[in-house]
Amino acid sequence: MGQIRDSSSKISHLSEACEFPSGFGRKPRSQIPNAASESNAGGETEAAVAKPKATTAQLALIFGLWYFQNIVFNVYNKKVLNVFPYPWLLGSFQLFAGSVWMFILWSLKLQPRPKISKPFIVALLGPALFHTIGHISACVSFSKVAVSFTHVIKSSEPVFSVVFSSFLGDSYPVQVWLSILPIVMGCALAAITEVSFNVQGLWGALISNVGFVLRNIYSKRSLQNFKEVDGLNLYGWISIISFFYLFPAAIFLEGSQWVQGYHKALAAVGKPSTLYLWVLLSGVFYHLYNQSSYQALDEISPLTFSVGNTMKRVVVIISTVLVFRNPVRPLNALGSAVAIFGTFLYSQATAKKKKGGEKKD
């Protein structure tokens, strides 16, 4: 029972700290036979199946890869949108690239292929819809404002998570409610002092938060009967279904502008191969950084993950500010810092809440 509680703790923590549906957990392959033998023997201790702690070198590699993939995605995603401002098409391609990546993994047997059934697909329709809303809204925001501003506003996702979950009956300690205050105040200060401020960019980031939070909440309810499917496979199938949601809408909303926009983008970039490379990198690294974030939680504790996730956002913001040379006012920087610090406090408060719940069990 201790192993089950630990697994569910990681799953729920990942959904709050990162853009993953709740219910996305990965049972490490090395633990599967151990779990089976534990159920058969009946007398083995948890220590027999506990994973060794990651070394400092392993942690550096895990975080380094995770941060690097995030930076590459954000830089090339923005580079494409600067010359080809059609987020619906780019967002569709990113989901398509992730889908192709998963089919390659399944075909080469690098990832176990999940058993697909009609109930499984039906259960994914809701989470995939909210994932689509969250993804495309973020893409729209990236196309309208500086990457750093979008990330600051997206750091307010815990606010929506606490509010929506509370309406549905969940309860949170005072520490959690207090932790969202600096997030709200920091985001507000960052918004009113943002040089690249755009209403569509702001609303895109906020709607993205709503989409991902609703995806997390809905996933808890619709995917309870499919816990045997690991996190990467669930994420892969949600990407596939999301692509079929998004691409028809992209054709309807932007399709008539793509040819003209393509020629303008070529004129701005110079070489077609450069534009193609940027698009490809944005698509591949969009999937890779999501994959790495869930794999990172396999190797480290939820608390370490939450700290790493907070620092990841700081690293991405600083990197994109340096790459694109976005002007940053002192008050804007202060607001961003306060908001991100609030997400750190939130992650600490929720981690303590989960530990308290496990002790009661």
Image (spheres, helix red, strand yellow):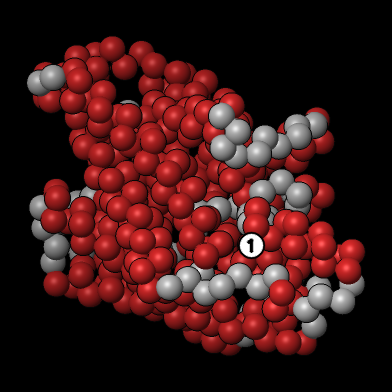
Q: Position of residue 266 (x, y in %)?
A: 16, 19
Q: Nearer the viewer, residue 139 or 56?
A: 56
Relative placement, left or right, of 28 versus 89 is: right
Q: Tell me the quadrant of the picture where the C terminus can be found.
A: bottom right
How many numbered tags mark residues here? 1
Q: Residue at x 57, y 56 (%)?
A: 213
Q: Residue at x 45, y 80 (%)?
A: 345
Amino acid on which the number 1 mark rests in the picture: Ile
Relative placement, left or right, of 226 versus 197 is: right
The quarter of the picture where residue 355 lies is bottom right
The quarter of the picture where residue 140 lies is top left
Q: Nearer the viewer, residue 185 or 320?
A: 320
Q: Tell me the quadrant of the picture where the N terminus can be found.
A: bottom right
Relative placement, left or right, of 183 versus 114 is: left
In this rendering, the answer to whether 121 lies above or below 259 is below
Task: Characterize the local packing of mark 1: few (<14), some (14-19) or many (20 or more) Cα atoms within 10 angstroms.
Answer: many
Res. 337 in view: yes
Q: Position of residue 80 (x, y in %)?
A: 25, 33
Read off the residue under disc 1. 11
Q: Position of residue 343 (x, y in %)?
A: 43, 72
